[in-house]
Image (cartoon, rainbow, N blue to C red):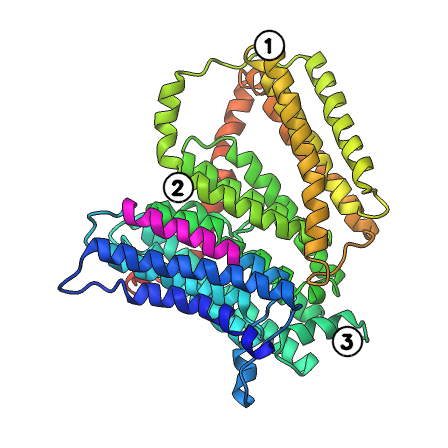
Amino acid sequence: MPLLAILPPALIPMMWLIGGIVTRQGPDYRQPAMRQRSLCCAFSALLLSLLAVGILIATEATTPTLPGEAGQFLSLRLDAISTTMTVLISFVGLVVVRFSHNYLAGDPRQAEFIRYLCQTLAAVSLLVLAGNLILLLIAWVGMSLSLHRLLLFYPERPLARLAAKKKFWLARLGDAALGMACLQLYQRTGTIDIAEIATIASENNGLSLVAPALLLVTAALLKSAQFPTHGWITEVMEAPTPVSALLHAGIVNAGGFLILRFSGVVVSSELALYVLLLVGGVTALFGSLVMMTQRSIKSALAYSTIAQMGFMLLQCGLGAFSSAMLHIVAHSLYKAHAFLASGSIVDAARGNGFQTRAAEVRPVAVAISLIIAGGLFIGGSHLSGLTLDTKPTIVGLGAILVFATMHLLIQSNRQTRSLVLFAKAGLTASVVSGLYFMLQIGAAQIFEGAVPSEGQLLPLQFLLMLLMLVTFGAVIALQWFLPSAQASDRWRAFWVHLANGFYVNQIINHLVLPQAGDSDSRYRA
């Protein structure tokens, strides 16, 4: 069975590669035929992903390999993480490929775009399925190089070249960090098998894994557009919309996946957890603030991705790995839809007419919303059996759910003061609160054994979590009182600086890009 188990997952990246090959443009190029072939391969990849889930359910987590000495270099990991990610990637990939056919209809380079897109999806699929360090590193680099071709699909656009250049150099730094981490892990554990490395790391036999853990964290931070190296993801909007959808819904999650795949190694180093917690928290706060100031839909979505990736890594820093995995799935589905539907936002806004300025927030509305949101959270926590003793991170970060439901209730009362609308918002808040606890419990059960179970927080972790909760609450409150604050000249000046991200990206451009060379030719596809 282990040998047969390798066939369906091995065919998933192969389907994407075939999908790219069959779209090669020739003298008898016909768009309908290309559409059918590429969609057939994409749909086959999704079916194979579901089959891999069935194999995992029927057996257990395994690392099937091919026979022979060379087989260890071609091993694939079949567990809850890899199967969840392959289904997610295959589904989003199918949607993006289908959307791309309509989006680029009539473009003479459409077949070339679909080919690069399928190659990128093949690399991402191989990355999440890799069962050994060598295959994982190859897929990691291949994913970056394939994405580079998509970012430069319109090489005549200066902003596209700028974003691709910055991403190119940051990706090479990430590749170097991951390469050194893999080398360190092999030297200290004596194996390239990822499952065996996780087992050795969990045995706590005095083996120091601080250096490889920090290198893994560095690679993840660079891949996930974390502050202050976040600027490139806000500048890739010159690429076609399907690229943005795939990037924000899939590829940017690679950093989080890397931490989850090596979570056993990361938790062995308190310093690595603190770095994830601090950088992720700062990035989440920064992205949330700047997102509020953006007038462009895609720019707002980009800063939303920055904030969401920061929050996901913050969860990893707190040891809530199953919650982070759930976050990846939810964010990917939401962000893929948001980018692919961004073109219809203008029409929707026209249909709704001009929005009137929201009324001031009344203190009584804040108090009532706090009572309702807090009651829903306490009730959900009690019914689900989750406490600060058993699941401190899930319950602690659940306080953000209180802020979110409060915001929903307050916003429903600002425009019309309608009790009916407020009641509907309360019902929605109840459903959201219930789903939060149900999904958290489900994720903990699904990924049990694939990631370390959540334990008690270290004192510094608990302190930093409280600090993050206070700052996130302040960001939510800031949105409630914006109308009155905007009358201040000092606030308007601060708003301008905030809209420019405090010029961090411009400073990075000035410091880094001249060192990368002035010629753009080396970065062309």
Q: Which residue is mark 2?
A: 340
User: Is residue 301 located in the magenta-colored stretch of the structure?
Assistant: no
Q: Which residue is mark 3?
A: 207
**Horizontal side of residue 203 vs 105, given as left or right:** right
Q: Which residue is mark 1?
A: 417
**Mark before the other along the chain sequence, 1 or 3:** 3
Q: Amino acid at mark 1?
A: Arg
Near mark 2 (Cα within 10 A), the count class, few <14, some 14-19 or many ≥20, is many
Q: Which mark is residue 101?
A: none
Q: Tag 2, which secondary structure?
A: helix
Q: Tag 3, which secondary structure?
A: loop
Residue 418 drawn at (x, y percent):
59, 10
Residue 515 drawn at (x, y percent):
41, 61
Residue 200 drawn at (x, y percent):
74, 75
Q: Amino acid at mark 3?
A: Leu
Q: How many marks?
A: 3
Asked if marks 1 and 3 touch (Cβ < 8 Å), the reply is no
The answer to whether one can see residue 148 in this image is no
Q: Nearer the viewer, mark 3 or mark 2?
A: 2
In front here: 269 or 143?
Answer: 143
Seen at 32% across and 64% down, the residue is 20
Quadrant of the rendered structure where residue 428 is? top right
Q: Amino acid at mark 2?
A: Leu
Q: CA distance from mark 1 to mark 3?
A: 62 Å
| Quadrant holding the C terminus | bottom left
In front here: 329 or 219?
Answer: 329
